[in-house]
Amino acid sequence: MRHRKYPFIFGFLVVPVVLYIALVIWPYLQTFGYSLTDWSGASPEMNFVGLDNYVKLFGDSVFLDALQHNLLLLIVLPLVTILLALFFAFMLNVGGKGGTGGVQGVRGSAFYKVVFFFPQVLSVAILSVLFQGVYRTDQGGLLNGVLVELGIEDPNQPWQWLSDPNLGLWCVMGVLIWSGVGFYLVLFSAAMQSIPKDIYEAALLDGAKRGTTFFRITLPLLWETIQTAWVYLAIAAMDAFALVSTMTPGAYYGGGPDHHSEIMATLLMRNFVTFGKAGYACAMGVVIFFITLVLSVVSLRVTRREKIEF
Amino acid sequence: MGSATEYNRRDLFKRAAAITVLAAGGTSLLAACAGGTGSSDSKSSAPAAGGDSKNPFGVKAGDPLDVVIFKGGYGDDYAKSFEDMYKKTYTGAAISHLGTQEISGKLQPRFNAGNPPDVIDDSGAQQMKIDVLVGANQLTDLTVLLDAPYLDDPTKKIRDVLLPGTIEQGTVSGKMYSLNYVYTVFGLWYSAKLFKDKGWTVPKTWDEFITLCGTIKAAGIAPFAHQGKYPYYANVAIFDLIAKQGGLDLVKKIDACDPTAFDDPAVLTSVTAFYKIMEGDFLLPGTNGMTHTESQTAWCQGKAAFIPSGSWLENEMLAATPADFDMAFLPMPSLPGDKLPAAAVRAGAGEPFIVPAKAKNKNGGLEFLRMMLTKEGSGKFAAAANSLTVLKDGIGADVVLKPGTKSSATAVSAAGTNTFNYTYPDLQSAFNEEVQNATNELMNKRIDPKAWVARVKAATSKKV
């Protein structure tokens, strides 16, 4: 029967592979093609312009700013999200009272898990509306309202949050982290629960403190999950389009004030849709694609460790 | 995590790309089609074809008509009544109607595939930019419409019954590509009731305005609100001052993105005068970061005295406006040495309707526009959308106007021929974006008037 194996496997694979090529690979190749043209995005006509778009791109100070903002997101977003998620997951799973051997979570951990996961259920559109209410710039905003009540800020000079050039991007980052922590908490919890309890018990018998158990046992055994989380968060950081475009000020697709929260995706959409520079926008798309690809490969390689089995 | 956002953007992009694949694949075929219809169009579009005033474009009664309407502040019910008018004449025509806010999302793929609708109300935040469409040869030159007979009185041509400025507003490099159907008036708005209660006089000059702002502030109300998240509205105030100070030639130079326009002392004078609002701390606290809905609602609640906007404001805020608010319009107060009189207002045509060059029933689209420009069509629009149209004397005595619309109509007749309008927000998208950013910095006092002028001057080099 052995000679029948390959046609059998091929029969199953051919449809998905064709679909993948047609729906994923081919559009990407098309985008590469368009990035070499002056396509307007509003007409089937276009001319070949070579690498002009790429040359322009790296002389465009707004694009370079946007790139920097994405890189800032790339550092802060995964770091803070993973640290918070790890801390909470540890507390919920093995952070309980000492008397129990330290292998159970704090009281009510099942309830907290649901509460923390809840933001993940909300759609991005709801998040955006919700937090625009929180960050509203007059006293009607939740934050400003509370701060004015507490006497911390002057009602006649309320803080600008999203409209403040120094705060805008951080405000969006806050929302991204707020909405992301719950998911990674649940992910890390699941991984932690698969660690056998006797390892912890043995460590406790040897007199290990909570910190030591975390760094010597939990973290190494969780490494692969963290690695996955890192790649996902890095991809999210390269995007962040929906929140930035809807929450921040700016004429088309946000990014304001004055490009201070500009990211590559908002600039791409503005060029693609508003300014009719679709070829140029495709060049940005290609750059984003390559950065994301390189990042994923690098973070998977660099953080590769020997697999620990239990 | 952000996978949902990632999905949305990528999905959108992929879809666009996928559609362009189809478009690219069929290019030769489409080009052939386009060539075919193009030649027949040029024949039928010559209005001299027998001088048939009933059907100057040679519409075939059985051809379906594809209409896409921006469903914004004016809704889209008015368009349905136009479609009924169209059906009365061309009984066999099947009309497909789409009312949507996602203009570019719905239409960009269709333009790229060479399969656009026959007539589009191309407006709203997701408008497909007219300059971009013209640059891509996607729009029909509407000169044939202007030269077609006016339905209510076939001895006149359409171009004779349009309000002044309508043709210019849709004109790109000498040809009219969009019919801007709604007559919009721009300026400052206030509550006549509030002013009466407080005993405030409406200011005529900018000095009076600034003095009054002090009085208003002392009374515990913020003198000035604006739609901070969208600096477009603050630009209405700034560029109105500039137009009145510098005159119509300056307006033309600014629209043409001529950098020397910003060397005219009228620009710096106007911006410096406007900056007194910030220097006097007359802004509604928080207004610099508020959306148009948030700030306009605060204004309707009496938290601020003045707000800049166009005449769609009244219809847009119907639900939030108190019954006795008595909305009123004020032309931008005048500066010493203004070239235009105090009564001059920014007024003109808005809400662009277009007929794509590759539309299947282009003639039907043109005819649809011609039907909109009748007393019947204009009256139906005014009744449904609380706004005026660009048809001269387009509204009969039977249409009752709301106080704000009435007030702006009075201002327009007081202005007479002294109206002006800017085309740059529609036709110079990249410049417009940069001006908005500069104005946002000015409103936040992060730059001063001199720096604003320098920045805007530099932005004239930005073209799409």
Image (cartoon, grey):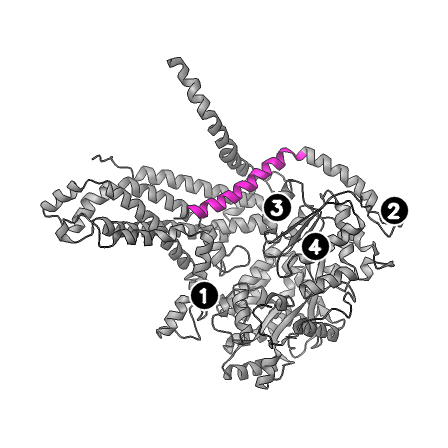
Tell which circle, 3 or 4, labels the residue nearer the N-terminal end.
4
Q: Which mark is residue B108?
A: 3
Give, as a single range, the part of the protein colored magenta: B1-27
**Residue B11 falls inside the magenta stretch:** yes
Contact between marks 4 and 1 (CB within 8 A): the answer is no
Same chain for mark 4 and mark 1? The answer is no
Chain letter of the residue carrying label 1: A
The front one of A201 and B171 is A201
**Amino acid residing under circle 2:** Ala
**Amino acid residing under circle 4:** Lys
**Amino acid residing under circle 3:** Gln
Q: Main secondary structure of the magenta part?
A: helix
Q: Circle 4 sits on which residue?
A: B80
Q: Eyeballing the image, is B82 above or below A31? A: below
Mark 3 lies on a secondary structure that is helix
Q: Residues within 10 Å of mark 4 (few under 14, many from 20)?
A: some
Q: Which mark is residue A136?
A: 1
What is the C-alpha distance between the residues marked 2 and 4? 30 Å
Q: Eyeballing the image, is A160 above or below A289? A: below
